[in-house]
Image (cartoon, grey):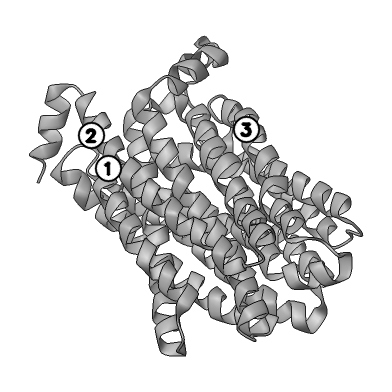
Amino acid sequence: MAEPPAAENASAQVSWRASPWYMLAVITAVNAVNWADRQVVPILFPGIRSELGLTDTELGIVGGLAFSFVYAISSFGFGYASDRTIRRNIIIVGLIVWSAATAASGLATSFASLFAARFFTGIGEASLYPATMSLIAERFPVTKRGRAMGIFGAAAAVGAGLGIGLGGYLSEALGWRNVFFLYGSTGLILVPLLASVPEARRDTTAASAEPPMRVLGELIRDRRLLMVWTSGMMMIAGGFGYASWIPSLFVRERGFDVAQAGILFGVAALIGGMAGSLLGGVYADRFRRRRLAGELDLSMMVALIAMPLVAIVLVAETLPVLAVAGILGPVAIYAFFPPLQTVLTEIVPQHRLGLAYAINILFLAGIGQGIGPFVVGRLSDATGSLTTGLAIPIFAMGIASALAFAAGRVVRRGAPEETATSADSAP
């Protein structure tokens, strides 16, 4: 007998929701909100600086260290939980916490209170990457992981673009406090959608049998992982330092108002970042088919390309040149990261990925993302020139390129011969 229509519809609905692409779509939307809440802060620097009287060093701390330090530390707890429990629920809790903390940033009356709000934003946002990267690695085969990572990473560009572009416009229209209130409330809308993602029970025996401190020790002592993490740390220090301060440079020294700078660099981050993440993901899969860790060759190349593009933005005299370099720079910067994330899923066993991505967050967000804006702001205060401070990101990108090249060689040298051979000969 034919299945009743109601049963057919129910079966189709369950199948659709169980698709890895549905899961990817939902967590990608959550990632966009994550990055919008994170990246809205730099475009609000002028208003915060004027009202609260903060120095560039203090703004650099608020934009980087206040968030990133606790973000990195908290990720270890969330990474441990991601290897042992329902990852979707971990993300839901984190989303609620970081949305509430973002809204609370609008109530700040001093450096200390703004620091505290960003501190709790960092705790909440630390839940996302260990859980989502474990989900992507579990639900997508290695031949498609680069593309999945690229799509997920493109949300960072969407969020950064909305954070900077829309945030600058809203800051002029509503004031910086109301921007925090609005962005904080947006994340709560996604909670029901995230709750609709099914997650099957999995075997956590292997993860539970391993003492977490022993796992952390073995991961940190793995030279291949250290090279990959250090490369990513330098690139995100450069990229985040550039993105955090470039709008302020154009407000202070080029005569732009906050809304104009926000639209210019918000659109550049949105278009360039989306294109870079997607291209980085697609070509990571192609470079991987050439040889083991071939993705890192791509990271090396795009980091080198990013350096002159960022330099052009700092000195460009005409709007067309500024617009082209402003868009192509984020293309190269964002294309750097999907290959790195894909390589990690090849090196680390599935039951250790939560803790491995926690260490990844420590290097990239805890250290790289934290020191990038801080060092630029500190050098700006020391020299009296924000342009001079923004030379630091270019230098960091050069180091990242060299480290990515070295990391690829280390990964291939430490791989079993049959693994390297199969990668080299893959179609």
Q: What residue is drawn where x is 67% and y is 78%?
A: 252
Dots 2, 1 in contact, CB < 8 A? yes
Measure the alpha-carbon separation of dots 2 and 1. Answer: 7 Å
Residue 426 screen position, x and y as percent: 11, 41
Label 3 neighbour load within 10 Å: few <14, some 14-19, many 20+ = many
Tag count: 3
Residue that extends furthest to the front in the rendered view of this protein: 383
Task: Determine if residue 327 is in view.
Answer: yes
Give the structural element (helix, strand or loop) at label 2. helix
The x and y percentages for residue 276 are 38, 63
Q: Is residue 228 above or below residue 376?
A: above
Residue type at tag 1? Phe
Q: Amino acid at mark 2?
A: Arg
Q: Amino acid at mark 3?
A: Phe
Q: Earlier in the sequence, mark 2 or mark 3?
A: 3
Q: Report helix, strand or loop for mark 1.
A: helix
Closer to us: 258 or 427: 258
- The residue to which callout 2 is attached is 409
Residue at the image position 51 percent from the left and 56 percent from the top: 392
Estimate the x, y position of residue 302 in percent, counting from the top left: 31, 58
Separation of residues labelled 2 and 3 (CA atoms): 31 Å
416 lies above or below 390: above
Circle 1 is placed at which residue position? 405
Q: Earlier in the sequence, mark 1 or mark 3?
A: 3
From this viewpoint, is residue 274 visible?
Answer: no
Neighbours of disc 1 within 10 Å: few (<14), some (14-19), many (20+): many
Task: Name the element at disc 3.
Answer: helix
Answer with the quarter of the image where residue 12 lies. Answer: bottom left
Which mark's residue is nearer the viewer, 1 or 3?
1
Residue shown at 67%/57% (left/top)?
382
Which numbered marker is on residue 10? none
Q: Which residue is mark 3?
A: 78
